[in-house]
Amino acid sequence: MHIHLTARTHAFTSIGNEVLQDRRLSFTARGILVYLLSLPDGSPMDVRALADEHPHLGRRAISKAVDELIELGYYERRTVRYRQTGQVRTEVHVYHPN
């Protein structure tokens, strides 16, 4: 195999090889993680939104891949109550390991 990389100066995401080569994750989970890490902070993305944007995968496959990410600490859901409005929301936090 020969690898041919192009130097990027804009519109790119830097991902450590430890994420891409984490054999505990399925290829689907790795792809979702890389996709999520490429989005701007604050993007409204959860399992439903991922399934809507990528219908060829299906909600069940996406949910299973997100469960893998949760189990390994890459993805976290937090339930938050806003004091001003009393609304309860679920926040999603996505992590790239150090």
Image (cartoon, grey):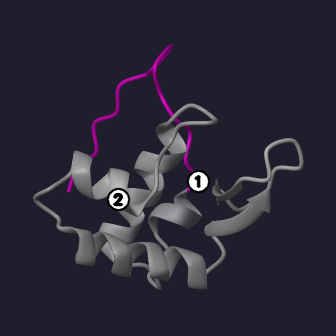
- Residue 42 vertical position relative to residue 75 in the rendered view, above or below: above
Return the residue nearer the eye: 61 or 32.
Answer: 61
Query: Residue 84: image x %, image y %?
Result: 87, 41
From the viewer's perspective, tell me whether residue 28 is left or right of residue 12: left
Return the residue nearer the eye: 5 or 34.
Answer: 34
* Numbered range of the magenta stretch: 1-16
Return the residue nearer the eye: 24 or 53.
Answer: 53
Q: Secondary structure at mark 1?
A: loop
Q: Amino acid at mark 1?
A: Gly
In this view, the residue farthest toward the front is 85
Q: Nearer the viewer, mark 2 or mark 1?
A: 2
**Residue 58 sits in quarter:** bottom left
Query: Residue 93: image x %, image y %?
Result: 66, 57
Quadrant for the C terminus in the image: bottom right
Query: Residue 57: image x %, image y %?
Result: 17, 64
> What residue sits 79% from the left and 44% below the top?
85
Residue 16 is tagged as 1
Residue 48 is tagged as 2
From the viewer's perspective, tell me whether residue 66 is left or right of residue 40: left
Quadrant for the N terminus in the image: bottom left
